[in-house]
Image (spheres, rainbow, N blue to C red):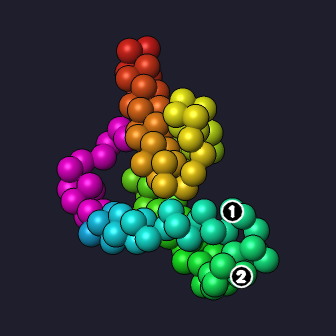
Amino acid sequence: LFPVMEFTIGGFSGRTMQDIFHALPAAALLAICGVFLPRRLDLLSIGDSMALSLGANVGKNRLFALSVAALAGALTTSLAGLAGFTGLMAPHIAGKLTGEYSAKALMITAPLTGAALMLTGDIAGISNH
């Protein structure tokens, strides 16, 4: 029962560098894919009809963005468990802190904000033991 509780709460306790090294190839591939996301996401954010009129392939862009997001979520969940609060709140906090809500800005600031939230939570959890 304990591993199930650890997974649902989330965190990095019990993770080794070997776990990180196993995830690096997938993380590198997702980072490369992430380079191509901001322009596509900004086009999708203006609406389907406007994006179509600008020549964007809405279906392919949406599929690509959703695939990268799903795979990134799966990778982080496999390492950190269900840290849902971080995944839901990091983009909103990053947008409020920077005042910038474009996809390009959030692709950089949201992961950093999420990392800071997870690190803060783990440090707070350690200090309570």
Nearer to us of marks 1 and 2 is: 2
The residue range painted magenta reads: 5-24
Q: Inspect the image, locate mark 1, and give the three-letter code of the amino acid beneath it.
A: Ser
Write the residue at 24% across / 48% down: 16
Frontmost residue, 13 versus 69: 69
Quadrant position of residue 86:
top right
Q: Is residue 119 left or right of residue 51?
A: left
Compared to 67, does 93 lie above or below?
above
Residue 35 % position (x, y): 39, 66
Looking at the rendered structure, the secondary structure element under dot 2 is helix
Find disc 2 in the rendering and name its residue. 52
Q: Is residue 38 left or right of residue 25?
A: right
Give how far apart the Cα atoms at labels 1 and 2 are. 12 Å
Write the residue at 69% across / 75% down: 51
Question: Which label's residue is closer to the chain start, 1 or 2?
Answer: 1
Find disc 1 in the rendering and name its residue. 45
Frontmost residue, 97 versus 82: 97
Quadrant position of residue 120:
top left
Write the residue at 57% across / 51% down: 102
Viewer can see residue 116: yes
Q: Is residue 121 left or right of residue 31?
A: right
Q: Main secondary structure of the magenta part?
A: helix
Residue 107 % position (x, y): 47, 53
Label 2 neighbourhood size at 10 Å, few (<14), some (14-19), many (20+)?
Answer: some
The C terminus sits in image quarter: top left
Compared to 127, does 74 lie above or below?
below
